[in-house]
Amino acid sequence: MLRSGFTLVELIMVILILSIAAAMVLPMASSAGSIQLRAAANMVAADLEYTKSMAISRGQAYSILFNKNNETYRVQDHNEVDILHPVKKGLPYVVDFPHEGRLSRVTIDNVVFNGTSRVAFDYLGTPYDDNGASLNAAGSVILKAGGDTMTVKVEPVTGFITVN
């Protein structure tokens, strides 16, 4: 008489394969926020560099205004009018983290440019705050996703931008 079923060895092999697969999937699922955070920090740094280069190449001030409450920022000209996005033709240069699917987990935790939430660059690339005063210390934008944070810094005088 034959009995159908699985042997103990077969069951152990299936459990072993499933646990290896689960061990590979869990780190990938939990790191989605950190991947979005790094992408957002690099994007903020690139947009700060773009704003600085616009100011230098056009010989007039350009700025970025961060809105911590709405999780947005916008690139503006010397009249504080949103400029057009260089890639998204015809649309204002506004980044909205909650509505950007690839950055939806990222929040703006803090923005400090001499106590203001705007940084402007003059024709030399020197950073200024919202009141027109040059930065007396490094300005920063702190981004958060889950328990991770990243800081984008703008150095005074030179406007050098780093991501930590």
Image (cartoon, helix red, strand yellow):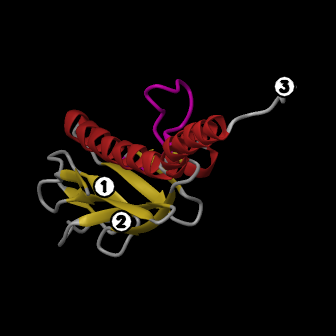
Which residue, given by chain and number where applicable, does mark 1 sit on? 120
Which residue, given by chain and number where applicable, does mark 2 sit on? 130
Residue 32: image x %, image y %? 51, 47
Q: Residue at x 32, y 41 (%)?
A: 46
Say which amino acid is labelled 2.
Asp
Which residue, given by chain and number where applicable, does mark 3 sit on? 2
Q: The N terminus lies in which quarter of the figure?
A: top right
Residue 148: image x %, image y %? 42, 62
Give the structural element (helix, strand or loop) at label 2.
Answer: loop
The quadrant holding residue 77 is: top left
Asked if the stretch drawn in magenta spans residue 32, the answer is no
Give the structural element (helix, strand or loop) at label 1.
Answer: strand
The residues bearing labels 3 and 1 have C-alpha atoms spaced at a distance of 82 Å
Looking at this view, name the residue that lies furthest to the right: 1
Residue 80: image x %, image y %? 44, 51
Q: Is residue 15 left or right of residue 75?
A: right
Say which amino acid is labelled 1.
Ala
> Is disc 2 in contact with disc 1, using a CB cutoff of under 8 Å?
yes
Give the structural element (helix, strand or loop) at label 3.
Answer: loop
